Each structure stands twice: as C-alpha cells, then as structure tokens.
Image (spheres, coloured by chain):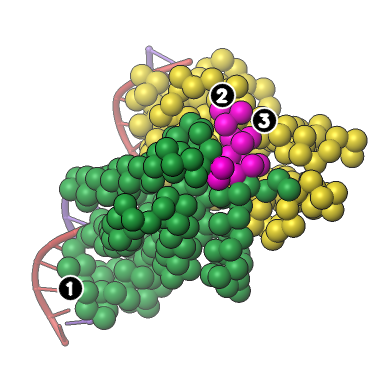
Chain colours: A green, B yellow, C red, D purple
Amino acid sequence: MKLTRRKLEIVSTAAKLFRKKGYNSVSMRDLAQALDIKAASLYNHISSKQEILAIIILEVAENFTEHINTVFPESINSVEKLESVIENHIQITVEKTNALACLNNDWMHLEQSDLESYLVMRNAYEAKMRNIIEQGIQQKQLQDRNIDLVLFSLLSTLRTLHLWYSKNKETSPQLMFEEMKQNLLHGIIR
Amino acid sequence: MKLTRRKLEIVSTAAKLFRKKGYNSVSMRDLAQALDIKAASLYNHISSKQEILAIIILEVAENFTEHINTVFPESINSVEKLESVIENHIQITVEKTNALACLNNDWMHLEQSDLESYLVMRNAYEAKMRNIIEQGIQQKQLQDRNIDLVLFSLLSTLRTLHLWYSKNKETSPQLMFEEMKQNLLHGIIR
DNA sequence: GTCTATAATGTGATAGAC
DNA sequence: GTCTATCACATTATAGAC
C-alpha cells in the first residue's frame, strides 16, 4: 500500500479526529475542513472513509504483530519477554498515539476482510502473550494465577495507556517504562 | 427521574446495542426494531436519543460516586480501601455490564449539562482514588511510585474489566475479586 | 401506546468543469 | 488536485390518525 504525501496527510489528520470523536462521529466534511479542502476533493486521494480507517488500524496492528514475533524465541526468559512487550506498547503509545486510540475504539467499525485481518492479528497476539505467561508460570517465574485474568490485567492497561499519555505528554518513555514495569509486574503493595 | 416499565425496557435495550456498536452507530430505527416497534413510537416514552444515553451513563456514574463516598472515612487503612474499590468495580461489571461499557465508550457523546455532570463525578472519583493512594504511600503500605501512573494502572484495568467478563460470564465475582486483588495489588511476579 | 407520513437535516460518494 | 453541484439515502424527531 503506497501512501503519497497527501494521502498520508489525510490519514493522519483523520486519525487525530477519529481519536477525539470516534469514527462514526467524524464526517468526510469534518475531515475535509480540517485539511482546508472540500469533501469531494478527498476522493481524489482515497477511495472511501472505510479505507482510511483500515489504513490507520492495520498499520498499528502490524507493528504489534511484528514485535511479538521478534520476542518469541524460547531463549529469552518469560519475564524479559514481558518487559519487552511493555516497552513496545509504550513506544507505540508515544509514537502513534492517535492511531492506537483508533485501533482501540473503532476496530469494530472495520468491514469484511479488513475486520477479519485485524481479528486474526489480535487473536494471534493474545495467543502469544498467553504462551509467555504460561511459560512463566511453568518456570516458576510468575505466580500461579488465572492465566486469562493475568493476560487481561496486563493488556487492559497497556492498550489504554494512550489515554494517560494524552494528558501527560511531557513524560519520558523511560520513566513510563520503569514505572509500568513495576506496577504491572511487581504490583503496588510494599 | 421516574422510569416506567416501558422506558426502562427501552433504556436497557439501548444499553445492549450501544455497547455492541457504539452510540452513534445505533439508529433509533435499530433500537425500535430490537423492541419490535416503530421508531416514532419510542418518542412516546423518551424525549430524545440523548436522553437515553444520559440515563444509562449517569446512573452508573452515580453508583461509583456513592460507593467511593462510603469508602472515604479515614478509619480504614488504604489497602482495605483499594480492596473495597476493586470489589465495587467487579460488582458493577457483573451487574451492569452494558451500562458500564456505554459509560466507558460513549461518555464523550453526552451533551451540555449531562456531560458536565459526568465529568464532575469522574474527576471527583479520580481525586478520591488519588487520595487513597497518597495515604497508602505516606503510611508505607504502598510502594513510593508515580501516583498518577499507579492510579491509571488500577483504573484502566477495573474500568475495562467488562470486556473480559463479556467473554467469561460463568466466572464468579468471588474468583474475579481474589484474582484481581492479587494481580493489581501484588503483581504477577513470583 | 403504536402507527403512517413526513419534515428537516446530514451522510458518503460521484460527475464534470477548471 | 480542487472545485461546485448533486444524487441517493439515512438520520432524529414531530404531527396527527387510530
């Protein structure tokens, strides 16, 4: 999927608006206005509103997929794997805040093959995270808990960290990484 | 706000649909169809689509507000306060799954005084949670960390627990409470 | 309390001039 | 590459019959 400069401009402006109001509350007229052109002109660069949403979401989804695959080798221990996953979530939160928010809020508005692609990637990602946690429990590095709830505890915070970051943009990724590693892995009790 | 039987039926059906597709993707025709009547008939019971959203969201928001106020007395120690908050989130997750999902996903589609009321309640809630965490750190019951990120770690998971519960409805609230208490307060590392 | 009919507006998208 | 004009349809909501 080749993105011309103008198309990229449209997609990234759309991501900003979708994040603030949601996909279905942003009209093509709203988007055009934000770019200082008329709605009809958008269609010289993109084929539909759906295409914009798919470009935004699938690119971030692919980022997550690529990273979890680099983390998968059996050599690293499971806690180091989790730390690497946390680090990656923070990096994407910081670098692609708008697109990540779209993925979280509007994935269900994808259609047909794009929706399918997204769900395949999400399921594969969660399955791999689940494997890491199982391995950690077997190797006695992690507490023996309900695996699905451990998985959810981690992902629910990591996926929505963009909400916190939007209001705390001056925070360094390093600080976020150190603090979240502690909170998520070691808990908050002294 | 007195709710007749029929109005309650409309509101709770709306909550179910809003949760699945989002407020702006559910038309009055969709809602009417789910109730097996025509869209115009809805207006004999409710004054607008907005009113439905406000009823759904503000009721849950008031539930949270009421609970945090019962928890506030200085007598209880901060870890017990946090446990009580976790328990309350789980109860609302289980008993008002649809409405909670609406609150999380569609609060920004509230308008005027309803939006204002919601934000006031949310800000007050977060401020009280923040106080609990500060107290815990001062009393050396909690680790000395970035307070805002501790707060976010807790709330991000508790607020979205309905996503997990939707797919695991057979789980008992007791089990959820025990596991989440461990994950959130003590972490996952052995 | 529900219906049919309809008003008033907003929507995604296209045609064709420049 | 952007514009004006427009299509075809969906939207929330109201009026008035039954």
Callout 2, which amino acid?
Leu
The secondary structure type at the circle numbered 1 is: loop
**Quadrant in the picture for residue A30:** bottom left
From the image, tell me which residue sits under label 1: A2
Q: Position of residue A65 (x, y in %)?
A: 29, 56
**Quadrant in the picture for residue B87:** top right
Q: Position of residue A164 (x, y in %)?
A: 58, 59
Answer above or below: position of A63 versus B99.
below
The secondary structure type at the circle numbered 3 is: helix
Q: Main secondary structure of the magenta part?
A: helix
The secondary structure type at the circle numbered 2 is: helix
Mark 1 chain: A
From the image, tell me which residue sits under label 3: B88
CB-based contact (under 8 Å), mark 1 and mark 3: no
What residue appears at the point 46 percent right and 62 percent down from the top-left corner? Answer: A87
Answer above or below: position of B43 versus A161.
above
Callout 1, which amino acid?
Lys
Callout 3, which amino acid?
Asn
Q: Give the crowd class for mark 1: few <14, some 14-19, many >=20 residues within 10 Å.
A: few
Q: Is residue B51 visible?
A: no
What residue appears at the point 56 percent right and 50 percent down from the top-left corner? Answer: A184
Q: Position of residue A115 (x, y in %)?
A: 25, 47
Q: Give the crowd class for mark 3: few <14, some 14-19, many >=20 residues within 10 Å.
A: some
Kindly indicate whether the residues beneath marks 2 and 3 are on one polypeptide chain.
Answer: yes
Magenta region, residue range: B175-190
Kindly indicate whether the residues beneath marks 1 and 3 are on one polypeptide chain.
Answer: no
Q: Is residue A27 magenta?
A: no
**Comparing labels 1 and 3, the label whose residue is closer to the camera:** 3
CB-based contact (under 8 Å), mark 2 and mark 3: no
From the image, tell me which residue sits under label 2: B175
Please state which of residues A78 and B34 is positioned toward the viewer in this rendering: A78
